[in-house]
Every structure is written in structure tokens, then in C-alpha cells.
């Protein structure tokens, strides 16, 4: 994560420090209010490729950075709305969502290798695909990860989508606790417009496919929080 952000991402996008001013001061105050160890603030030149607007943070331990898309500042949101978006993003940090996802990924990786270790020498598995006298490891990899794991991957994908949606709603609720619900609503509408998002989906389709709830679902949830 840090290697990509510090050494690879700058090869494709221009990162510049956020200039001194009201916005920078208010972001630093927001970070301090929730004990976020902010080290640097950047603006990335995303407008050269698209109108996509967003903000994110990265880094380990006490070496955190916040990055704002230039489109978010120039043509997107006002300062209050930018702070609301950041409150949502910092909610992911405060609620340990990144750490939880990392732990789940490591547990899943361990389970995958454990199942492979149990099955890759199973002769009946190879025989089912015509390998009666041989057990090529590459064939075992393909069979196990493409076929044996297929039902598991579908279930895991749905569970991770559901968890991601829960995290998004929790981060929105965190922004609400910081008294930024109204600004977050207006920011979400602008971001959805800039990112060319479609606001209305069937709830069942959305539940299965969208790791980030659509605009109307998030606005409705913020309304219930009020």
C-alpha cells in the first residue's frame, strides 16, 4: 500500500501539497479532533483523465497521508462538503475497517492454501479430469481454485460485499456524529453526478452487486440517523 502510494502512483499522477489556507487548517483540525495522525496533505491531478472526484487516506501507524482529487476542490464540493467526505473516509480509519479487511484477507488466504494442501494429492480429483496416472501440480491448482473453490468464492464475494456496505453505512454514521450529515448528503449528490453514477437500483440487485450502496440508499440511511 505504502510502496504503491509513494513510488508507483506518482509515476502516473501529479501529487502536490495542499496549499496553506482555510481548507488545510480545517482538515488538520478535523484530523486532530479524532486523533488521526496526519503527516501530509496532497492534491492529486485527477482531472487530466476524468471528472471523477474523491478523497482517500493511506499510510501505516503515525505516518498517515490524506489525498484530495483536484476535481473535488475545483469543480466539486465546497469546504464543508470536502470535510464531510473526509469525515466519512476517516470514519473507516477510526472504526478499524481497513484492519478488519486486512485480517479477513489473511484468514481467507490461509484457508485457501490449507484446502489446497489437503486436496492437491487427492487422486480422485485428478481422475475426474482424465489424469489417472499423473498428478500435475498445475492441474491441481486450476482444478481446486477454479472449480472446487467456485461455490466458496461466490458466498465469500457476497459476504464481503455485505460487509463493505455495512462499513460504508457505519462511516456515514461516523460523519453524522461529527455533525456533518447535511454536508455529506450534498457532497454525495455532487460526487454521484461527477462520477456519472446512477442513483436508483433494485434493492436486491444492489445488495448482491454493490460494495458501496447507491446514492439513494445512503441518503435514506442518513435520514434515518437524523
Image: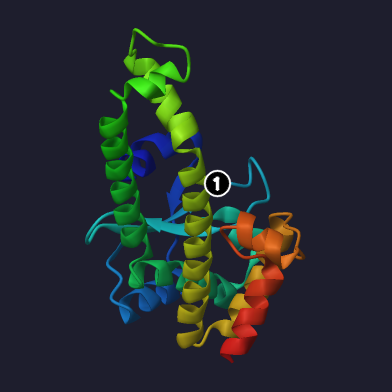
Residue sitting farthest toward the left: 62
Residue at the (70%, 67%) spot, across then down: 203
Residue closest to the eye, 26 or 198: 198
- Residue 41 spot, x, y in % from top left: 39, 59
Answer left or right for 45 relative to 167: right
Can you say which quadrant of the picture contains the C terminus?
A: bottom right
Check the image and report above or below for 8 versus 44: above
- Residue 29 spot, x, y in % from top left: 37, 78
Residue at the (53%, 55%) spot, across then down: 158
Can you say which quadrant of the picture contains the N terminus?
A: top left
Residue sitting farthest toward the bottom: 226
* Figure coloring: rainbow
Answer left or right for 9 relative to 80: left
- Residue 22 spot, x, y in % from top left: 48, 74
Check the image and report above or below for 196 versus 9: below
Q: Quadrant of residue 37?
A: bottom left
Is any atom of residue 40 visible in this view? no
User: Number of labelled discs?
Assistant: 1
Answer left or right for 6 relative to 188: left
Task: Give the residue at mark 1.
Answer: 45
Amino acid at each position: 500500500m505504502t510502496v504503491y502510494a509513494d513510488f508507483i502512483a506518482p509515476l502516473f499522477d501529479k501529487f502536490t501539497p495542499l496549499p496553506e489556507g482555510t481548507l488545510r487548517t480545517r482538515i488538520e483540525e478535523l484530523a486532530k479532533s479524532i486523533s488521526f495522525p496526519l503527516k501530509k496533505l496532497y492534491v492529486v491531478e485527477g482531472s487530466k483523465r476524468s471528472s471523477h472526484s474523491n478523497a482517500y487516506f493511506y499510510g501505516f501507524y503515525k505516518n498517515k497521508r490524506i489525498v484530495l482529487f483536484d476535481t473535488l476542490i475545483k469543480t466539486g464540493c465546497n469546504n464543508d462538503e470536502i470535510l464531510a467526505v473526509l469525515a466519512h473516509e476517516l470514519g473507516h480509519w477510526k472504526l478499524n475497517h481497513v484492519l478488519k479487511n486486512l485480517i479477513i484477507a489473511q484468514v481467507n488466504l490461509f484457508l485457501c492454501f490449507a484446502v489446497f494442501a489437503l486436496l492437491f494429492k487427492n487422486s480422485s480429483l485428478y481422475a475426474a479430469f482424465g489424469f489417472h496416472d499423473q498428478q500435475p501440480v498445475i492441474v491441481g491448482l486450476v482444478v481446486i481454485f477454479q472449480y472446487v473453490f467456485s461455490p466458496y468464492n461466490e458466498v465469500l464475494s457476497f459476504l464481503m460485499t455485505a460487509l463493505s456496505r455495512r462499513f460504508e453505512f457505519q462511516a456515514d454514521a461516523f460523519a453524522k456524529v461529527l455533525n456533518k450529515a447535511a454536508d455529506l448528503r450534498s457532497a454525495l449528490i455532487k460526487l454521484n453526478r461527477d462520477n456519472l453514477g446512477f442513483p436508483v437500483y433494485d434493492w436486491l440487485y444492489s445488495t448482491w452487486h454493490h460494495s458501496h450502496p447507491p446514492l439513494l440508499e445512503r441518503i435514506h440511511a442518513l435520514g434515518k440517523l437524523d
